[in-house]
Image (spheres, rainbow, N blue to C red):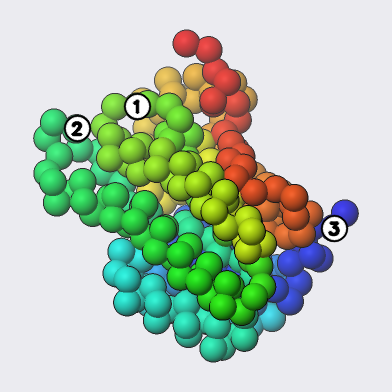
Amino acid sequence: MNLAALLKGKTVFITGASSGIGAHLARLCAGCGANVAQAARRIGELAALEADLTALGAAGVLSLRLDVADEESVRAAIAAARERFGALDVIVNNAGVASDAAAMDMSAAEFDLILGVNLRGAFLVAREAARGWRAEKRGGAIINIASVLGFRQASGVAAYAMSKAGIVQMTKTLALEWARHNIRVNALAPGYFDTAMNAEFFASEASKVLIKRIPMRRIGDPGDLDGPFLLLATEASRFMTGAVIPVDGGHLVSSL
């Protein structure tokens, strides 16, 4: 089965698309011939990606300023994408922020920011998309980007890990509620990946200790997400909902 061909002509709405995994997935969808609605707070960086997406073969490209933690911003962005492309097929909840503050030293404001973007923001986007699909009497697919830290623990990432654990439970709960509307809600749980957010750490000696604890003995490349993403984004997974797929080099099955 050619999964890429199944995405051709579909419309994919991606949050946090200005860099890292979000930008990679936008390029992947463009290469499959999909319409790409790329959304982020940094609209300037999205504009710079438009030419790349068009050159890769995107059927259409729309760049949207979006603050996922702001309810009105979410409404406006999804409405603009629907107006441009007529309908949405896939929502990718990728926007996220992190902090390396120890839990005891973290301020309430910093905690609220991380949970507000990573969890509340993902819920607002999913809910707005689902309301539209219900009104249109059509289904759709939501892919939440979770993390292995939704299942495991590490020091210095307390709020981030809590938010990703929330994403795991949100995925399963919304899948249960929305299956009757033919809305599928699944998630990818990446392990440690080479992105701008953690490039400095993985260039350090300290990272070698962590990598030795990953059974495949390497960190992920964004391309490692392509197959699992295309599965969840297309009708190839038409009978899947509530699934959380780890893409982690075996991190979750590593020994103590």
Q: Is residue 203 left or right of residue 30?
A: left
Q: Earlier in the sequence, mark 2 or mark 1?
A: 2
Q: What numbered label is drawn on residue 123?
A: none
Q: Which residue is mark 2?
A: 102
Q: Tell which of 89 and 227 is nearer to you.
A: 89
Residue 154 position within the rendered picture, expressed as x and y whole percent measured from the top left: 34, 27
Quarter-of-image position of residue 55:
bottom right
Q: Earlier in the sequence, mark 1 or mark 3?
A: 3
Q: Secondary structure at mark 3?
A: loop
Which residue does the image show at 14% across and 51% down from the upper left? 109
Inspect the image, locate mark 3, and give the three-letter code of the amino acid beneath it: Asn
Q: What numbered label is drawn on residue 154?
A: 1
Inspect the image, locate mark 2, and give the three-letter code of the amino acid beneath it: Ala
Q: Secondary structure at mark 2?
A: loop
Q: Is residue 156 left or right of residue 60?
A: left
What is the spatial separation of the Cα atoms under label 2 and label 1, in whole angstroms?
Answer: 11 Å
Residue 238 position within the rendered picture, expressed as x and y whole percent measured from the top left: 75, 55
Q: Which residue is mark 3?
A: 2
**Pointer 3 local density, CA inside 10 Å: few below 14, some 14–19, many at least 20:** few
Q: From where the camera sits, is residue 100 visible? A: yes
